[in-house]
Amino acid sequence: MEIIPAIDIRKGKCVRLYQGDYRRQVVYDEKPLAVALKWGSQGTRWLHIADLDGAAGGKPENIDSVEEIIKESGLSIQFGGGIRQESMVEELLRKGVRRIILSTSAVENPEMVRKVCSRFGEAIVVSLDARDGKICIHGWRKDTMVDILQLGRDMVNIGVKRFVFTDIGRDGTLTGPNFDMIGRLVSGINVPVIAAGGISKLEHLERLKQIGVEGAIIGKALYTGDIDLREAITSLGHREAR
């Protein structure tokens, strides 16, 4: 199982939100690159980078930070936040992003998702961000009545080969993942699923591995010290050769 540290960027800083609430923000570092290098030194191969300004505004706003991290860290980056045009997908891949994470587009512009999946294959990931089983879009600020499992199946049918699932109600809370929904996704969609939201103990990671997720994104628990990244990778993840 891949252990993937999360770096959320807002106004150029590394921050964490509580349940996606932009009003409940903690700044953990003024320089996202410093955080990326820290996680890289502890053995991670991947980083999950979210552009919070982009997610809310509809266009990535922190690409310079992402480029700097790619250049200086050498890590594989999956990046999302406001990516809603095919041209932006192409630009980010050209800049060295390994995986592009789409969310709002899966609901509002599935034809675009179909096109980029056809062009770029496994470089395209759809993030299923849900509150009480229903998808939320526009940086989690807009609720929908779209069922998470149905959207997942629809996306598989148009070519999506990997998903990130975040339970918004658990994100940043350290209260544990939504194991039930994660299990339903893994068994019901039959493509790789990366889990996020609420992970705060090695035991959570162990259970996720048993469920069969491909990876686990860890955010707040790394910043608070509830999980030691090196220990998690040694116990459950893939280690980068150094």
Image (spheres, rainbow, N blue to C red):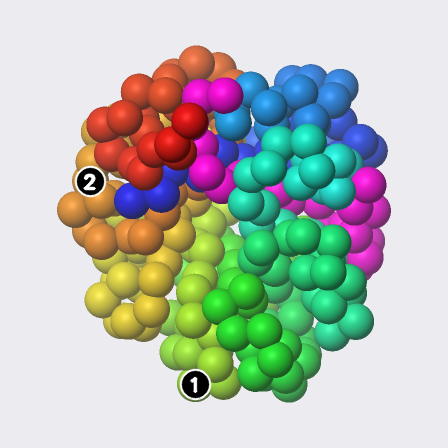
| Residue at 46%, 38% in the rendered image | 45
Q: Quadrant of the N terminus?
A: top left
Q: In the rendered image, is residue 126 in sight?
A: no
| Residue at 67%, 52% in the rendered image | 96
Q: Is residue 17 found left or right of 53 in the rendered image?
A: left
Q: Can you give x and y, in whole percent of width and height, for residue 138 in the image?
A: 70, 58
Q: Is 76 drawn above or below residue 6 in the view shown?
A: below
Disc 1 target residue = 157
Q: Can you give x and y, in whole percent of width and height, for residue 169 in the image?
A: 47, 43
Query: Crowding near pointer 2: few (<14 within 10 Å), some, many (20+)?
Result: few
Q: Amino acid at mark 2?
A: Arg
Asked if the stretch drawn in magenta spans residue 59, the answer is yes
Query: Distance of mark 1 from mark 2, alpha carbons?
Result: 29 Å
Q: Residue furthest top?
A: 225
Q: Is 107 drawn above or below residue 88 in the view shown?
A: below
Q: Earlier in the sequence, mark 1 or mark 2?
A: 1
Q: Is residue 181 found left or right of 111 in the rendered image?
A: left
Nearest the viewer among 3 and 238 is: 238
Disc 2 target residue = 207
Q: Amino acid at mark 1?
A: Asn
The kind of secondary structure element at disc 2 is: helix
Q: Can you give x and y, in whole percent of width and height, for residue 68 in the image?
A: 75, 36
Q: Is residue 211 found left or right of 154 in the rendered image?
A: left
Q: Can you give x and y, in whole percent of width and height, for residue 19 in the image?
A: 55, 38
The kind of secondary structure element at disc 1 is: helix
Asked if the stretch drawn in magenta spans residue 62, the answer is yes
The magenta span reads 41-64
Q: Residue furthest front?
A: 242
Q: In the rendered image, is residue 74 in sight?
A: yes
